[in-house]
Amino acid sequence: MSSALNRIPEKVHRIYLIAVCGTGMGALACLLKDLGFKVTGSDQHVYPPISLLLEDKGIPVLEGFDPDHITVDCDLVVVGNAVRKDNPEAVRMRELNLPFCSMPQAINHFAGFGKKSLVVAGTHGKTTTSALLAWILFSAGLDPTYIIGGILKNFGTNYRLGLGPYMVLEGDEYDTAYFDKGPKFLHYDPIAAILTSIEFDHADIFRDQTAVKNAFDSFISGMSPQSTLIAFDQDPIIRELTHNRPCRILSYGTDTGSAWRLGNHSAAPPWTHFDVIKDGEFWGRFQTRMIGEHNLWNALSAIAVADSLGISPAEISTAMKAFEGVKRRQEIRGCKNGITVMDDFAHHPTAVRETLRAVKSFYTSGRVIAVFEPRTNSSMRRVFQNDYPLSFDGADLVCIRNPPLLHKIPVAERFSSELLVSDLKSRGIDAHFFPDTDAIIDFLITAARPEDLVLIMSNGGFDRIHERLLDAL
């Protein structure tokens, strides 16, 4: 959709955000408030942590999508990517001929002007990697701006308006808005970018792996010859897409020929120690509270970007040790009667597998109990039905919830939690199906034992299962 109203006017005072409680939209709303704008918004099914962030910032959030929320005194409407063209507020916005834009457009206009963008893209690890990179820059005194899809524990927010030259952005491949179906990351022009992985995901907008691959191909193609792409060396699609590109390519991972290589590493809870090899030579030894080899690869890519900006190994080491992580990424929510409850955002089969693999190496005294809620547009579809049974090998006990929003998916495309449990049992895994969250809590009250880790994986609020389980134990 192209319109003269799809723009940002010169004079703006009041800004309204439709679907303001998404992680990116919530961060943008807070940033706009800090810039002095009058900010309001609306959403439905609001839950922490973004709802609390907006409340603390004093940004009114109207419940539901009501055309009466949109008034003629709005100078600009920012439309979230989850908003459909027939959304009542979007319809009223067009009826009133109000100027509107997408979230990436607003970020570039209000936060990115004059900044050098550092973008983290990929199917997995974007939030953790961009959070770590932002923290390294801050710790080194570079005062970065950032907008990230998760709450950084070091700051207590998922955004920051800095005075320094750099802006760290989580580069999302998801579509931009109903009037712009291209990926969000195509709106950014990074001087340096990280590409962590490319796998099929977002089955609601990408029809297959080729479509996903084409999106990332467009991102790489858009990078200028003066920019640098830090690319993961263990991903075959990345290797294919980064061949013979005009921008500078630096690979990272475990290949001996890569510019940045992960050396020896070991777990010594609560720390992980790891060596970094640059251009075939030992470059430094670091320690982090992050768990798992996948997080060491994330750290390695952030180190590579930091080095390209002139940040010293000593400064990076100091930041790495002080990095507290991101909420909902291997976050300990509490411990009751010797039972630890951990929250994680994992939902893609690969993310589930790697998260379980990571925590298994740290929590060796008791069992790992995996609790999984298929809630994303992809996980509620059959596309990963045959992949999930191979993702839970790191768990000693598995609890699978029936998808809570399954009615939104066409019957022929629906994922079956009961079939997943059956497949897990056939592989010798102790797995159980539950129709709702209450049933899971009732089961865990008696099933969990001291020294067990209960790993709860979902991209949503999961009916406040973390707090409720801790209260019930």
Image: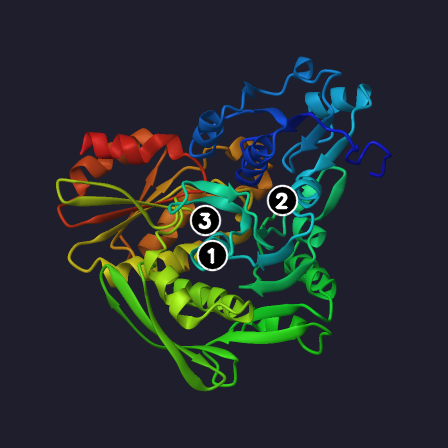
Quadrant that contains the N terminus: top right
Q: Nearest the camera: 216 or 204? A: 216
Whether 473 is drawn above or below 358: the answer is: above
Residue 394 visible in image: no
Callout 3 secondary element: loop
Q: What kind of residue is marked 3?
A: His
Expressed as whole percent of the image width and height from the top left, the position of residue 375 reads: 48, 40
371 or 141, nearer to the observer: 141
Q: Badge 1 local density, few (<14 within 10 Å), some, or many (20+)? A: few
The residue tagged 2 is 204
Secondary element at tag 1: loop
Q: Which mark is residue 347?
A: 3
Q: Is residue 435 above or below residue 316?
A: above
Tell me if label 3 and label 1 are in contact, CB under 8 Å. Answer: no
- Looking at the image, which residue is at 59% across and 41% down? 412
- The alpha-carbon separation of the residues under discs 2 and 1 comes to 41 Å
For label 2, the crowd category at 10 Å Cα-Cα, with few meaning under 14, some 14 to 19 and many 20 or more, is few
The residue beneath circle 1 is 141
Task: Give the crowd class for mark 3: few <14, some 14-19, many >=20 residues within 10 Å.
Answer: many
